[in-house]
Amino acid sequence: MININEVLETNKMIEKENLDVRTITLGISLLDCIDSDLSRLNEKIYNKITTVAKKLVPTGNAIEKEFGIPIVNKRISVTPIALIGSAACKTSEDFVTIAKTLDRARKTVGVNFLGGYSALVSKGMTRADELLLRSIPQALAETELVCSSVNLGSTKTGIDMDAVRLMGDIIKETAERTKEQDSIGCSKLVVFCNAPDDNPFMAGAFHGVTEADAIINVGVSGPGVVKNALESVRGASFEVLCETIKKTAFKVTRVGQLVAQEASKRLGIPFGIVDLSLAPTPAIGDSVADILCEIGLEYAGAPGTTAALALLNDQVKKGGVMASSYVGGLSGAFIPVSEDQGMIDAVNAGALTIEKLEAMTCVCSVGLDMIAIPGDTKPSTIAGIIADELAIGMVNQKTTAVRIIPVIGKTVGDSAEFGGLLGHAPIMPVNPYSCDAFVNRGGRIPAPIHSFKN
Amino acid sequence: MKKTIITVVGKDTVGIIAKVCTYLAENKINILDISQTIVDDYFNMMMIADMSIAVKAVSEVSDDLDKLGKEIGVVIHCQREEIFNSMHRI
């Protein structure tokens, strides 16, 4: 039988160390909504989402209360809209009407975010894909909580550099359209290499075409719990350090597994995966950078950071995999800048640069995330940053992503305010040298060789 | 059996257990086990209770106990047992 110390330990994690279930994400396939008539398509999409997700928020709230564990977000992901709208949409404006329908459906069911305004163009773009990409700035400016993602490359296909170059312009235009709010539109837009089909986290969640009609995916979080556990083993060897992280990750993930199974049972929708990510928030004590400091660094970004992060990421997976029957999504430590107070402090102290962040993304999920850069950064430079990050994913057979925010009207020394879970970010300097001739070549980077690994 | 864990944390004072037990009795919730400890001068009590024949749902009981806790100046949680089992038992 459960003893009092175990009960108190669990409740301490929840109350003092910010243990929570970060999100229950309901993936919904919209493939059966496809129609060549735009208004009929919009109507079908609205009806399907509001029917399937009707009970999502009340169910989440009930689980939260009965188990006493906060479930911070209830979200929806849908099939990439470039596929769903391809028969009906003749212009970018046509695609924007779908974005608005998604936002309306999201509001009706009361979820925090809806993801899937997406296109998968890792090898090439169809006409519909390109129309969707070009509609992103308007769609994100005119909707509230719809998220967009674009898969630009994969280990099997290489990188679609035409789309990468285009996304440089799209990100810049998205920033321009939302410049009154520190270019917040870009926080809802992420580009990927090797995007997973079952990611429950925003902005990159979409419901892949390989998935069932509807599925429940859950993302857990507990950087504060790991940090607190590590406080008790200061100065101990790597063996002790790793064992402590593993045990903690196991406990945290078990809660996610329980919530996922319970939600699946109550909604009558199959359980997909638990995403084993350490996802920070701007709240004090809910930081991945603080864990790195607890491991022994003065600031995130100091020499040793990549090794510490590699160790952390691996132990979280080792502990988490046994705790859950199905693991998927991104599964790793997130290192967003604006959403993590420890990262912000490191940038302000001059300890952390974009180049170091790029190195860190080689060993963790998911990439250059929530990084504010000067508003006058050229689109071709943004495309260059994206190409670098995607190359890491392509060669290392892992997911990488870029969610970067050129904050219009601001420059190094200023700070961008996004509010809520998105936090705030100091503007980081970008390498000033040009890559125009590289990104303007056109075409694709071929897929890498999978043998002769050295 | 539908087990829930009720925890009471706060400054020790006369009648805490009495008030909680009275509420449980009125709502047909059977207490299976009680344990308590003092952590950092705070009174910590845990009850394992069976709600099989309880008149109210867990979420409702949780709300009621939260309110009762506020009246007597302690924090009371009522949670289904599964969350602790899943975290601490393989």
Image (cartoon, grey):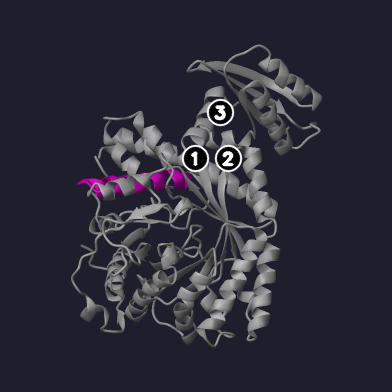
Q: What's under tag 2, amino acid-wise?
A: Ile
- Position above or below: A193 against A369: below
Element carrying mark 3: helix
What residue type is disc 3 on? Val
Could you say where residue A323 lies in the image, as x and y percent from the top left?
50, 44
Q: Do the residues bearing badges 1 and 2 touch, measured as CB atoms within 8 Å?
A: yes
Q: Quadrant of residue A213?
A: bottom right
Pointer 1: residues within 10 angstroms few (<14), some, or many (20+)? many
Secondary structure at badge 1 equals loop
Q: Amino acid at mark 1?
A: Leu
The residue mark sitting in front, 3 or 2, is 2
Taking the spot 27% from the left edge, 82% from the top edge, the residue there is: A440
Between discs 1 and 2, the one toward the N terminus? 1
Q: Would residue A78 be found to the left or right of residue B65 on screen? A: left
**Does dot 2 land on a helix, a strand or a loop?**
loop
- The residue shown at (36%, 36%) is A243
Chain letter for mark 3, please. A
Q: Within 10 angstroms of label 3, few (less than 14), some, or many (20 or more) residues? A: many
Instruction: Identify the residue under disc 1.
Output: A19
- Callout 3 touching callout 2 (CB < 8 Å): no
Q: Does any portion of residue A336 appear in the rendered image? A: no
| Chain part drawn in magenta | A300-322
Residue that badge 3 annotates: A7
Give the answer, above or below, for where A295 lies relative to A101.
Answer: above
Q: Can marks 1 and 2 be said to lie on one chain? A: yes
CA–CA distance between discs 3 and 2? 13 Å
Mark 2 neighbour class, 10 Å CA radius: few under 14, some 14 to 19, many 20 or more: many
Q: Can residue A218 be found in the magenta stretch?
A: no
Q: Chain of mark 2?
A: A
